[in-house]
Image (cartoon, helix red, strand yellow):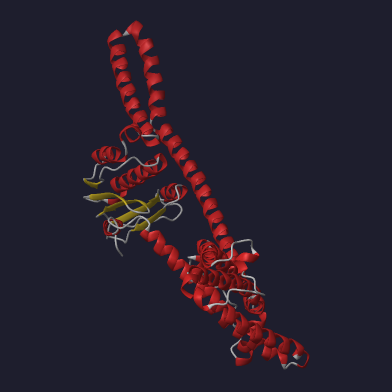
Amino acid sequence: MPSVESMTTAYAGAPATTAPARRYLRQLGIDTQYVLLGFPLGLITIVLCLTGFAVGLGTAIIWIGLPVLAGSLAMSRGFAHLERLRIGPVLRRRIPHPHYRSAKARNWVGKMFSPLADGQSWLDLVHGIFRFIPSTLAFCFVFTWWTGALSGITYPLYDWALPHTVDNVELPELLGFDDNAVTRIVFYLVVGAFFTLTLFPVVRGAALLEAQFARGLLSGVDELRRQVAEANAARDTAQEQKAAAVSAEATALRRLERDIHDGPQQRLVRLAMDLGRAEQQFATDPEAARATVAEALSQTRETLDELRALSRGIAPPILVDRGLQAALTALAGRCTVPVDLDAPVFERLDPGVESTAYFVVAEALTNVAKHSHATEVQVSVQRVATGLLVTVSDDGVGGASLAKGHGLAGLDDRVKAAGGVLAVESAEGAGTRLTAALPL
């Protein structure tokens, strides 16, 4: 497929109106042949489909008409397939093949009568019977406009060979124009110019009238069914993302509560006890009180460090200020396992995407340091056409899982909440490869 640059270079020296003119002429030819062929096809289908339907319905009471009806439906399905192929270029889109009910019976009798229970087959038959109406209207307009355009603009070539009077009165004279050859030729040229200038919109409108009628019967119900299915799938996806977001938020809050309880809260309790003991020691043993205060200061610094670490887990300032690449570099530098980071600098992304990508890498590196016994970790962040691809792989013992109850379940919920997908490859003894695909 040619690139945009090559196409731009190839057409750089062409007039600006060449490409649109070619498109108009091509579409005019497509619409014209569609309408002109549609008229005889409409005659054929109305005769065959209407005859088959009438005979089948009339003799259905004695069961002979059922095979005739089934044959008529099968025949109309063939005409419908042909029409779907024809209307694609007119509508400038591919018309999808609708779903037909498949025959569940294994014998030939059940398969023969299966079209009788298929709704789309009946719609095909309705189209075959009534398509003659829009086909005739479209044919009349297209034939009239092409005839008027071609005969009008070429009138000077054959004016000499035509009789010019109707009851001894020329047509221009009937319309109030002077009776001479120049006036007559100019008059017909003006008429031809009118038909020529309005040829494309009239032919296009006629072709769309016929094509939209066919599309509504031959694929409209199926397209509506597909849209409903897509809407239901989108609704289910949104509900899954909402549930994943709630679950990820609850998991993060529980973890934060646990970390605060196990870390800074215990240190603050000890700090309060140390300060109370120092207050009692100042009167009796000032040196011991100073030592206790010094130890309390050390506890204060450690508590602040833990609080800073927790705040980085909530919203890392470096991620907000300097972007994803700088935040991942700092994260890799704090990891106890050597990290090979491949994170090129690119433009700032959506804050939600950057935050999710950061937490994917942070959680993965934490699990590697605690459980994998790995000697090296590779972290890769790639900007692809569909989004952001984050990969973390190690050479550890493997065995990681996304199942509920494992450490990565909360991370999976966080990725789903962002509309992404998380995948884990972690065979026993073969290391772990964690991949997150995040949409932009």
Q: Residue furthest top?
A: 283
Judge from the rendering whether residue 352 lies leftward or rightward of residue 37; answer left or right: left
Residue 187 figure quarter: bottom right
**Vertical placement of residue 175 versus 330, above or below:** below
Task: Find residue 414 and report its horizontal and vertical position in percent.
Answer: 44, 46
Q: Residue furthest right?
A: 61
> Is residue 102 among the parts visible in the rendering?
no
Q: Work out whether residue 151 or residue 205 is closer to the camera in this orientation and state it.
A: 151
**Vertical placement of residue 336 versus 67, above or below:** above
Judge from the rendering whether residue 28 lies leftward or rightward of residue 58; answer left or right: left
Task: Find residue 266 and report its horizontal and vertical position in percent.
Answer: 40, 28
Residue 279 figure quarter: top left
Q: How many marks?
A: 0
The N terminus lies in quadrant: bottom left
Residue 422 figure quarter: bottom left
Task: Find residue 428 and report its horizontal and vertical position in percent.
Answer: 31, 61
Task: Find residue 18 and report its horizontal and vertical position in percent.
Answer: 36, 60
Q: Work out whether residue 218 or residue 430 is closer to the camera in this orientation and state it.
A: 218
Identity of the residue drawn at 45% across and 52% down? 405
Judge from the rendering whether residue 328 lies leftward or rightward of residue 17; answer left or right: left
Identity of the residue drawn at 34% across and 57% down? 399
> Is residue 192 among the parts visible in the rendering?
yes
Q: Work out whether residue 137 or residue 276 is closer to the camera in this orientation and state it.
A: 137
